[in-house]
Structures are given as structure tokens and as C-alpha cells.
Image (tube, helix red, strand yellow):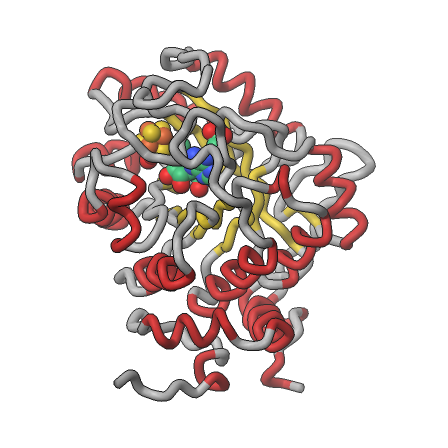
Amino acid sequence: MSKPVNLDILNSGQLRNDWSLDEIGAIYNQPFNDLLFAAQTIHRQHFNPNEVQTSTLLSIKTGACPEDCAYCPQSGHYNTGLSKEQLMAVEEVITKAQQAKKNGATRFCMGAAWRSPREKDLTVVLEMVKQVKSLGLETCVTLGMLTDEQADQLAEAGLDYYNHNLDTSPEYYEQIISTRTYENRLDTLQNVRDAGINVCSGGIIGMGEQTKDRYGLIQQLANMPEHPQSVPINMLVAVEGTPLGKVEKLDSIDFIRMIATARIVMPKSYVRLSAGREDMNKETQTLCFAAGANSIFYGEKLLTTANPEAEADMQLFKQLGIQPEGAEVTNDEIKIPAPKKKELFYDASQV
Ligand code: SAM
Ligand code: DTB
Ligand code: SF4
């Protein structure tokens, strides 16, 4: 029989790496207002509650991927009508990065539809990383599986973050991907961590998984030797032609519960409200921020699918009194955020 859980302790924001599924389930399922209060309280202990980090994505190599991820429009196994594109030239990527910076993004994430990078392709990506970094942007890449040598090369080029998602629970994973294992993914993340690169790892919900698979995903992330510095929570973008193209739409309350649970069990990680915002109204997104999401993909495109227009996001930020973290002034609408001062944040333990 499983041990009884004490919600006050679970909601206390302890940094732990030994979460049980029962504990995560208890956090996720508690009354919504209690969940939101706990998540917001923990959020304020580590972050400015009115700042959100903004990352812009660019697909640097699109489509014809040999992997069979059931959610992905870029898999060569499915016909989604996507036009394939070879690896972009470095200059073209830099132009896009400059635009992203001008629009107020602080991180530039480059994604490639590869199982793993070939040596000659990695050489080009290393150059992209160096040049994007020299613009004063943080860098992130997602290139598939990496060996330890490849992770070291990326670290040497100055890469700040590597994105590699676990996607779902170990149990549900086999329903989603057959061409690479969960273990493969954990190995890549280990190589990234060992190279000293920040880990960006999360998953997708709304793929027809059961609630216990969501707990399983959170458990895998939170019980890593170190919590990922960045945790993207994606809502499935159902793309016609993929096996998940007609899956039932996720209820927004479930998505918000997932964000809040990630915040509570990984108190110091950036939790990113990721793919799927095109299908969310502003109230849902607002509740995600209240639940501790403090990062978004910013810019009108994700990799191949649509994301809200930058202007709409800035408008929402303005309405909510949110500042883009560390953004430079590019027009009158974006103000320089105040310097970080931990003591200014609301600390529930002092009240
Ligand atoms: N090929 C690399 C890999 O899989 O590691 C990098 C790119 S891949 C598109 C990055 C992540 O995007 C996936 O792991 C998945 O979590 C997310 N993703 C892909 N398609 C998605 C979709 N339709 N809806 C939501 N998230 C998606
Ligand atoms: C992540 O967790 N989500 C991003 C990023 N990491 C690379 C990708 C979302 C892709 C959504 C489908 C598309 O645009 O192709
Ligand atoms: Fe390929 Fe990545 Fe898409 Fe999987 S998620 S099919 S590995 S691009």
C-alpha cells in the first residue's frame, strides 16, 4: 500500500530528487486554488513573479526526419505536406537571430530535424552558436541525440542550453516513438549535463496519455541528478497527417495543473509555457503565468507551426504587468526590467 501524503510538506517547495508518483499525483490533484497558491508562493521565492523569459525558435533544418515521433510534422514517416529544407546557411540564421533580438527575445533556439547530428553538420551548427552568442543572445540548440564528444564540442562553442525532451512517461513512450528509446534520451541528457551545458527538457501533454503518464514525466524530470534548468511543457499541436492529428483536445485546466505541478517540484527551474499557445485563450495563458510559468516561445512561428504574433504577446504582457526578462528597449512598448533584487520578492515565509 502507498504511504499517506502530507500536502503541506509537498507544497513547501523543498528541492528534492526523490519524488514518488503518489506525491506528484497528490500535488496535481489538490483543489485548484490550493495548487495555484502553492505554485505562486514557491515561484516568488526564486523568481520575479512579473518577469517572463522569451526564447525565439528557428528551424535550421526542416522535415524528412528518420524518427517516427507520432506528434511530429517533421517525421519522414508521415505525410503532413511540409516542405523539406536542408541545413540553413550561417548568414541566414544570423539575420533571423538579429531580428529576434530586435523584437525583444533574449534566447535564440535552433532546431534541426535529425536523429543525431553528422560531423559536417555539427561543424556548421558550432559556427551558428558562436555567431548567435556574439550578438549578445543566449543560445539553445536541439539536434537530436548527442554523444559525449559532441556535447563537449557544443560546450566549447559556448552553447548555453541543449533542448532534448523526454516527451512523456517511460510507460507511454512506446506508444509515441519506436525509433529511439527513453534510455537513449536520458543518455543524451547525461552527456549534456556532464559537458556543463544547461539542460532544457520537458514534454508534451494532450497526446492521449493518462494522467498518471503526466506524473511519470514530471517524476523523470524532477528525479534527475539535477533538475533541468529549463522545463518546456508543450500542449500537443495536432497536425493532420501525423498519427496524433485527430487526438481529442486537452482541457486547459489539465494543462495549468501540469504547469503548477512542474513549478512545485522543480522550484528553481524555468518552466516554459511552450507549444500550443495558438489554441489557448489569454485567460488560460494568464493562469499558466500565475501557476509559475516564466518562459515562452516568442515569435510568430515555433519550428513549423504557428505561434502567437509577437505584438499580441507584448500586448498581453502589458495587460498583465509582465516584463520580458532582460530584454533591451527596442521601442516604447518594451521597458527595461528593474535589476534583479531577490529581497524585493514576496516571501511567504516572512508574512
Ligand atoms: N529532432 C530533435 C529532437 O527530437 O530531439 C529536435 C526537434 S523536436 C521538434 C523538439 C521537440 O518539439 C520534441 O521533442 C517535442 O517535444 C516537441 N514537438 C514536436 N512536435 C510537436 C507538436 N506537434 N506539438 C507539441 N510539441 C511538439
Ligand atoms: C520544445 O519543447 N518545443 C519546441 C522546442 N522545444 C524545440 C518545439 C515545438 C514544436 C511544435 C511543432 C512545430 O512547430 O513543428
Ligand atoms: Fe525528428 Fe525531432 Fe520530429 Fe522526432 S521530434 S520526428 S526526432 S524532428
Quadrant location of the N terminus in the rendered image: bottom left
Where is residue 340, by image quadrant? bottom right
Q: At 26% from the left edge and 55% from the top edge, which residue is drawn?
A: 171
Quadrant location of the C terminus in the rendered image: bottom right
Q: At 23% from the left edge and 16% from the top edge, which residue is drawn?
A: 120
Q: Does 234 sit left or right of 343 as displayed? A: left
* Residue 83 image point, x, y percent: 45, 12
Nearer to us in this view, 345 or 34 = 34
Where is residue 330, by image quadrant? top right
Nearer to us in this view, 79 or 310 = 79
Q: Does 259 sit left or right of 157 as displayed? A: right
Q: Does 158 sit left or right of 132 as displayed? A: left
* Residue 14 image point, x, y percent: 42, 77
Residue 157 visible somewhere in the drawing: no
How many numbered marks, from 0 up? Answer: 0
Q: At 54% from the left edge and 38% from the top edge, which residue is drawn?
A: 55
* Residue 324 image point, x, y percent: 66, 46
| 325 over 13 or under it: above or below | above
Q: At 33% from the left edge and 61% from the top edge, which residue is drawn?
A: 216
Nearer to us in this view, 247 or 186 = 247
| 338 over 341 or under it: above or below | above
* Residue 136 image point, x, y percent: 53, 33
Residue 110 visible somewhere in the drawing: yes
Q: Does 308 sit left or right of 154 as displayed? A: right
Ligand 3 quadrant in view: top left
